[in-house]
Image (tube, helix red, strand yellow):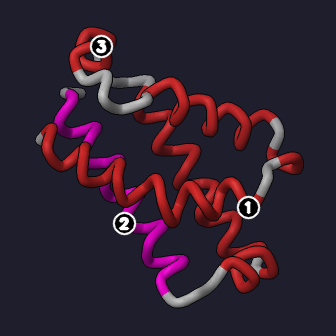
Amino acid sequence: MDNTKIISKIIKYIDKINTYINDINYTDFANDTKVQDACLMNLSQIGENITQIEYSFLQEHSEINWNEIKGMRNIIVHDYDGVNLRIVWDTIKFDLPILKEKLKKLL
């Protein structure tokens, strides 16, 4: 699969997350396991898709912290019950919009 298709998929996962949390606050998020599960699944897919991007492309675009994103995926997948919801919420609210804009520039 080519890098632009993978990046487009990642942007779609970000958009899905945004629909889940669109009208809620952190307290709502922390109390709704369905929304948590949906967001965590999509975050893990973002990290998984990054592993399919060519290494040279990742190096060329080091303005994006690819390893941090993959690291979050690893935490979600390998320590699901130990996930810190506040960090997940902050990532969704503050980091994903920035990531989306950076990714859109790569298309």
3D distance between C-alphas at marks 1 and 3: 30 Å
3D distance between C-alphas at marks 2 and 3: 25 Å
Q: Secondary structure at mark 2?
A: helix
Q: Secondary structure at mark 1?
A: helix
Q: Earlier in the sequence, mark 1 or mark 2?
A: 2
Q: Nearer the viewer, mark 1 or mark 2?
A: 1
3D distance between C-alphas at marks 1 and 2: 20 Å
Residue where numbered disc 1 is placed: 86
Count residues near mark 3 (Cα–Cα under 10 Å), then give few for <14, some for 14-19, many for 20+. Answer: few
Query: Three-letter amino acid code at disc 1?
Result: Arg
Query: Which disc number belongs to residue 59?
Result: 3
Task: Answer with left or right where residue 102 lies relative to residue 97.
Answer: left
Depth check: 28 or 17 in front? 28
Q: Earlier in the sequence, mark 1 or mark 3?
A: 3
Depth check: 89 or 107 in front? 89
- What residue range appears in magenta? 3-22
Query: Three-letter amino acid code at disc 2?
Result: Asp
The residue that appears at 30% across and 29% down in the rendered structure is: 63
Q: Nearer the viewer, mark 2 or mark 3?
A: 3
Residue where numbered disc 2 is placed: 15
Q: Earlier in the sequence, mark 2 or mark 3?
A: 2
Residue 80 locus on image (x, y percent): 80, 46
- Asked if residue 84 is positioned above or below residue 55 in the image, the reply reads below
Depth check: 76 or 105 in front? 105
Task: Answer with left or right where residue 65 lies relative to residue 3.
Answer: right
Tell me if residue 13 is in the magenta stretch: yes
Task: Answer with left or right where residue 23 lies relative to residue 75.
Answer: left
Query: Three-letter amino acid code at disc 3?
Result: Gln
Q: Secondary structure at mark 3?
A: helix
Marks 1 & 2, CB-CB < 8 Å contact = no
The residue that appears at 62% across and 30% down in the rendered structure is: 71
Count residues near mark 2 (Cα–Cα under 10 Å), then give few for <14, some for 14-19, many for 20+. Answer: some
